Every structure is written in C-alpha cells, then in structure tokens.
Image: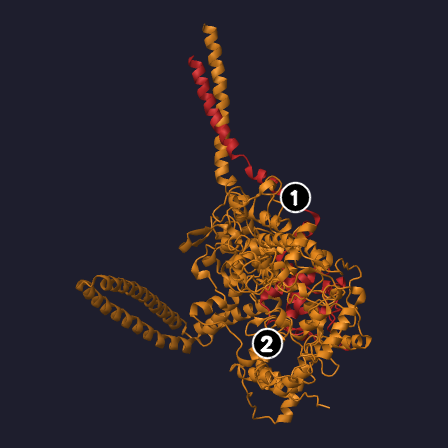
Amino acid sequence: MKTKVKISKFALLAVIPALMLAGCGKQPAKGKANANSAGADSSAAVVEANANLPFDIKEGKRLFNHYCSVCHGESGDGTGQYYGSSLQPSPANFTDKAFMKTMTGEALTRSITGGSASVGKSNMCPPWGKTFESDEIECLVAYIKSFSK
Amino acid sequence: MANENKNSSAYRAYFFAFFSVVLLILSAWVIWDDEFGLRPWKHYQKEYKSLKHDQLEKEYKQAQLEFHRSGGAKRLADLTAQLEKAEAALKDKGTGQKYEQLNRQLEELQKQSAASQKQLQTVRGKYLETEYYFTKTQKPEYKKEMDALQLQIDAIDKQSKDLQLKQEPIRESIAQIAGNIPALKAEIEQLNKILEDKKEKIANNEKAPIEIKQFLIKDVDKADRCVSCHIGIESSKQPSAKQPYAKHPLTSVYLGHHDPGKFGCTFCHRGQGRATTTVEKAHGKVKHWDEPLLKGDMTQTSCLNCHGDIKNLRGAESITKNTELIKKYGCYSCHKIPGYEGIGDVGPELTQVGTKVNYTWAVNWLLDPKKYFSTARMPKFFFTQDQAEAIADYLFSMSGSDRRDVDLATVKNDPKLVEQGKVLWSQARCNLCHATGGRGGDHSKVYAPDLSKVGSKVNKTWLFNWIKDPNKYFPGTKMPRFRFTDQEINALVDYIASEYVDDEAESKYVAPVQIQAASIKKGKDLVQQYGCYGCHKMRGMEMVQVAPSLKAQGVTFLRSDEMREKIGTELSSIGSKPVELLDFGKLKKSIPNDRLSYIKQKLRDPRGFRLGLRMPNFRLSETEVNELSAVLYGFTDSNAPVRFMVPSRQELDKMAGVQGYKFTGDFAKVIADVKCTNCHSIKGIGADYAPDLSLAGSKLQESWIRNFLANPDMIRPLLQQMPKLGLSLGKTPAKITMPKFNLGKQKVEDTNRSDVDVVVNYFQQELVTTDIPKNIPVIADVAMPEQIAQGKKLYDDKGCRTCHQLGTDGGAVGPNLSNVGNRLLPGFIFKHLENPKKYKPDIVEPNYGFTERERVLLTNFLMTLKISAK
C-alpha cells in the first residue's frame, strides 16, 4: 500500500511538469494554421501581393507617378507623354540596365535633390530638394532602381 | 518477503533516477525558456547590435579612407609637426616654463569656476524647493531660509564672476607667449574629432544594454513594447531593411508628426503592445485579442481615429482615396456614419419617375441595374419579376395610373436638328460627366448616368424639360442649367434620342395597362422594407396627387414620417465592435472569425450570413472590398486621448459657433444654377477636377475672366484633366475645356445683373486674400527692360521650358504661358513662385527656392507674355 501511495506521488510529480509542458506547447503554430486556412480567391491574392510590396516602393511609385512620370513615363523608360517632343536631351531611361549601373543610389539622390544641372547635366530636370523630404527621396530612389531589376 | 522488498526498492530507485533526470531536464528547460524562449527580443537586439556594429564599422572605414583621400591625414601630420615646432620654439625662448605655469593657473581657475557653478546649481535648486514649500504653507521660517539662500546665491554668483574675470588676463598672456599654439591645438582637435566621433558611436553601440524597451503613454496607461524587437524604428540610417530591424517608413511624415514617445505604436498599428513573448502575441494574432496588427496601407485606417479632415493629409493618401467609395455607393444613405451627414442623395428623385422613363425599362432596372450598365451604382436587390413590377407600379402610380412605354418605332427625329444637337453636345462637353460608349465620365467625382442607351429609357418631353431646368424636376441635382434656347434644347433632344438608343430595349406596354391597387400596396411594403427612400427622394403622400381612379381603390403612399430613418445598422464604431457581437451565422465555420473578415464578407455577399437579411449586393470588385473595408475598419470608438484629436474644419466651426462657408447673394444663385462646384472647389466646397477658385480674385485678371466665361478655352494641358476624367482617347487626346455654359446671355433670376458680372464681382469681393499682394516689390537699381531680360534668362537657365510652353516650344506639364501676362495678376505669380504648393497642394511644380529678387525678375518677364486679341 505504502509503495502505491509513493508511486502515485511520483506520478503526480511527473504529471505536473508534463501538464506544464503540454500547456506551454507551441500554441502559435495552431494559430498559424488557422490563419492560413482562410480561403482566398486569386483576385484577392493579387490585391494581397500588391499590398505586400515594400512600403518604400509603393510610396515611391505614388510620388513617381505624380511628379516624375509626366516626363519619365509611368514605366520609367523616359517616354512620358508631357515632355515636349522638341526638347533635348530626352528624359533618362530608368529601365536601361547599363545606364542604371552607373547611377548609384547616392548619385540618384544628388540628381533628384539638386536637379540635373547640379550633376553637370542639362537643366531639364528641376531640383526637388525643397519639395520633398529626404525620406521621400529615398522612396523615389528605391522605386526608380526597381525599374532596372 | 525480503526478495519482494529488494525488488520494490530497486524499482523505486529506477523510478527515482528516472524522475530525477526528468526534473533536471525540466529545470534546465525552465531556465532556458525563462532566459531565451520567452525573451525572443534578446536575440533581435543582439542581432541588431551586430548589424549596427557592421554598419558603423563600415562608416568608420569609409571615413578613414575619405580622411586620407581628402588630405585630412596629411594636414593633421603637418599641424602636429607645426605644434611641436612651436612648442619647441617656446622652450628655446625660455618662456616655456612660464607658459606651462600660466596654463596650470588657468586650469586651476577653470576647475574652481566649474565647482562654483555646480554649487550655484545646488543652492538654486534648494531655493526653488523652499520657495515651493513657502507658497504652499506660507510659513515664515521658509521665507527666512529663502532669504539666507538668496544671499548665498549672490555670493557664489559674485565669486564665479570674479573667477571668470581672473581668467581673462591669463588667457591674454598665454596668447602673447604662445602665438598660434592654441589655434593649432583647436584645429588638431577638430580633425581628430571626425574619426573619434565615429569611434565613439561604435563604442556606444557596444555599450547599449539588452533590455525591454517601451513607450509609456502615461495618461492612457499604455505601454508599447514593440521597440524591444523593432529596435531601429526611429533610426535615421537603418542597418538592415529586414524586419524587425528596419526603420519606420517615411519617418518625416509619420513619426515626425507623431512622436512615438507621446503616441506609442498601437494607437495606429493596433496589436498587443505589452506582449513580448512571441511575435504572434505581440502582433495580436492570437485568440481573444480582437485587434490584430495593422500594417502597410491598412494602417492608414487609423488616421480616421483622430483626424477629422483627411483630404490632402500627407501620409493618408490611400485611406483618403478609399473613403471616396463611401460617397460613391452612398453607404450613409442607409447607415448612420459620423461625418457623412447632410450629403445629397446618391440616387435621383423618384416621385415623378413615371413621367420620365418607360415602364419596361424601370422593371428591368429594378431586376438588375448592372445588366443595363456595367458601371451602374445601384445594387442588386434580388427582386422577383412580381416584386420588381410591384415597386414600379408604386412609383409610377405617384404620377399617373398606367404602365406605359413609348413606342420607340414611332419616334421621329429631325436630321437637321440632330446635326445641330451634335455640335451643341460637344460644346457643352456633356461627356465630361456623362459616359457614352465607354468614353468620358468620372464616377469617382461627379456621378452622372451613362447615356449610351438613354434614348430608349426616357421620353423626349421629359428630356426637354430636364435640360431646360434640371432643378425643377430634381432640386439639388448636380446637372447644370446650360442656358440653351428652346430651339437648341430641341436639337439636343433629337440628337440624344437618335444617337443613344438601346437596340435591345423592350416595349411591352406601348398600349397602356391600368395599374392594380393590390400591386401598389405590395410595392409600398417593399419600398418600406428595403428603404428605397434612403437613396432616392420620394415625396410623401401629403405631396402626391393620387389619380382619381386609384384613389377610389384606396391607394395610399408612404407618409414622410414613415420614410427617412436609416434602415441599416449604425456604422460609427464597426471597426471596434467586439467580435462576439458580429453575427457570422452559417459562415461561422467557413470564414475566420475576426472583424475584418466579417466586414469583407459582408461587403462581398451581404445576405450570405443567414436568411432574412435585407442589404443589397453592390457587386464590388475585390479591390473595392479591400478599400471599403479599410475605411469601415477605421470607424472606431476611439480610445485615443483628446490631445490626439484633430477635429475637422466643420467640427471646429461648430465648436466655435461659426457657420461653415456659404455662398451668398446672387453668386449663390449662379452656383445653384451652373453648379460650378461640380468641378471647382471654392472655399472648401466642391470637387477638385478644375482649379480651386477660392482666391480667384487675387489670381486672375478681370478681362480674362470675362473672356473665358463667355468662351472657355484650354489653359491647362491635358495632364491634369485626362487622368481625372478617365478619358483615354488614344494618341491624339481630345481638347478638354470647361463646358460652354452660354454665360452672360441671361440675367440672374430676380435681378438685373448678368451672371458674368455677378461672378466677377464675387471673385473680386469675396475670393481674395491679403496674402497675395496687389503690387510686387520694385527693383530700383535696374531698368525695367534689363529686368525683363534677366527674368527671361532665369526662365531659360532654370529649365522652365521642360514643363511650360511658350508658343509651341516646351513641355506640356504645366499651363502654356504664352498668354500668362493677360491671365494672371503679377502679385499671384510673385507669391506662387515662393512656394507653389501653397495654393495648390498637389501641384507638380517643385519649389526652386527663388530669392525675392529672382521672383520679381521672373514675374516682370512673365507679365510681358501676352497674345494680343485679334
């Protein structure tokens, strides 16, 4: 009888940590599975993918489309509709991989901030440093670089 | 027995050994879990530290290279040599000893001075403390103590001033003896500092403790510990763009205006700010935590918590765009939504609809609006044929007693009038608002019906009356009155009736059929049940003349007091409604049980949760569902403190007891008639298609306003109009100008003044600001022709032609400036060049940072650009 009692005490000792273990088991994994099971159709997936673009790129795109695409084109290839056909030189083509290799992030930042004239080019691209905050220019640079990736 | 005992004790020993091991493992596990398992942020902070170390190390190396490359190192060596030489020279001269002595004296004095400063601080502190007690208790002993302390302060103050004075002559003698030594030392120190600063940063990074970090917002008892993992959120240069090390995007906008020390994280991002044990818990993605983390564009939904006006709010672009959907679909018609009160009806007035449309069309429209037009805003109510007919019967009986269709085969149109009507159609720019054949119309701003098939929908008599005076049929409509002559209206009507017809239109009731009273009653119940009057104005039975034949059958209409309550659930706090209160019905098992999923599903399929729901299906695209749900999610019982709140202009006016801006006098009549605010915004009223006219009187020249109103011409390039109007017409864009309203031909109602006079007068009296000067500064030292030449040079040098045309040379981003001297007032150009965004926040033109002189020169040049009238 005595042993039995003792054993059950041991068993109790073993059961408590076992319960603790079970209790502390990785519940989040369960939560994950739950979240993933949410049915999503394909159009929702597209929207989702768009929503998951890095913020800098999305913000850069918004700014680019509003301020830059008029000359550089929404596809970044330098064929914006509102750049005069008589004007020379043409706006930079950001999809040109060879050209973009020569444009580091710093060079782009300088060119945007001070305008094309400030980096020894024509005066056709105006200076944006007093219009944008520096982190807005960072977003623009990130987006512009994404054209040649 | 003994054997048994032995067995049992061995058994016990094994047992004991086994559980000892288990206990040991458990203890180890407990310690491990406590140290690492439950503290994942430790790992992140260490990782961040090492990333930051690498970054700083790299910067240091670069700085070193740069230091050598730019000659800094050489200069440092030179200076050190010079210093040594100078010091040696000092020794040689025999003044070395004196120099050192003086330096020591100075050092001693400086030490004393610092000590007395410190003392002064302590005594002042004591004084303030005593003063506090004195004001609180008014006990004389405190006053006495204060006086004593004041004496002490004065004494110490005097002493430290003396010490300062004593230093002066010593400094002078040092300077005399030492020559350039102090200057050399200062420069050496400065040069050394460049690299030492970087080194110090590395050292500081090493020293940074690994600990729980938090933003504590005391007044709302919030502790956001997100920064324990998102350790670099406030850094200006992130060592890694990977989460959780990245910095906050667009810091200047978000953190710049919302100091995290005061706002924390979870007011905007939700999530469980106090949790630090797992990512899932911290991000609130666990059961019983109703507020999962918001990220990306979805976070902008939180702007709605505090900001009353989000239009033009930097950083809230996405949510601002999304809120347009509320207006587009008129959610506020059935649901109470704060901030959306008093907006006009989304649907047209229906009391007289029987005089307007064909009966068969009405029934088909009720069955499925999108079948008639894919762009239709009206949702599908899933009526049966019987129900649709009953509702149509109810509506038609308000203005007659028959089901009746126009016999389209017998409609005759005069070819000459049709030709004339076509010209008028394009002059009046009907396509700006109304789409036809997939072209024109921007439904996000001015919702005007698609007219592609209108000839088979409405009858010609109604159309004539409508164009003649839209306000008469539908008070408050957005349709302007164009001041056509009757002959012109006839021409337009014939053109529309012949051009825009529906080949598939049915006419079942060419021979009219009497409407049955029973059907009207059924229709009345349906109208009330589904709340049609939420979107469509229907005057109550008091206002409607019932046809005698129907009256005899006891037909009645809804009374005014039986209509107009919001038929749907109030949405003011849907974004914070507890999940348990959301009725998932039969979808409980098939969709995630969280608030956002509920809202999205409700928008996708409003009646899918269970039987008996009334909300119609708007057939939104998945993008629209996402956009609209983002807005709804932002309608919360905000728990943000009052100090966060940025009330809207409207609310501020209300609080201050000020009436919102209202147009007055004859100008109000012109606005109500021509609906200028469909396109122009004036003092915050209206849309942003066309230029804001709030300051038109300070901006535009009178003669130009008059010419333009009589004969609108294109000023701005298509850039600003095309995307807004959705008119993509291929390579040669059509010219889009303000519609020709035929202004100036008629007097304003009840007055003797022409509408153009009224407009010009109002512009000059009301729409002005003293901010824009009448006259620009005068440059006295240069003659005018030279100033103009200099202005021209600036125009060329700054590359203005990239965006503006003179003649046909230049880009088409901004307005053509060939005639700007006739159009704008010089004060406006002068002010505009200072900060273009000031008068048009979304302007593309950058700020060039011109000096005042440059702005005067440019203005003087631009004012010479005129095209003389022929």
Element marked by disc 2? helix
Residue B383, label in figure:
none
**Chain A display color:** red
Q: Nearer the viewer, residue A59 or B659?
A: B659
Q: Residue at x 76, y 59 (%)?
A: B507
Q: How is the image coloured?
A: by chain
- Which quarter of the rendered picture does the N terminus of chain B lie within? top left
Q: Residue furthest top?
A: B1
Residue underneath mark 1: A39
Are discs 2 and 1 both within one chain? no
Tell which residue pokes out farthest to the bottom in this image: B783
Whether residue B730 can be seen here:
no
Percent position (x, y) of residue A114?
A: 63, 73
In the figure, the shade used to draw chain B is orange
**B518 to the left or right of B232:** right
Q: Quadrant of the C terminus of chain B?
A: bottom right
In this rendering, is residue B281 above or below B12? below
Residue under numbered circle 2 = B671
Q: Nearer the viewer, residue B837 or B36?
A: B837
At a point 47% along the width and 16% down the height, the residue shown is B12
A25 up-or-down from B132: above or below: above
The answer to which quarter of the image holds residue B692 is bottom right
Type of amino acid at the residue the image marks with label 2: Ile
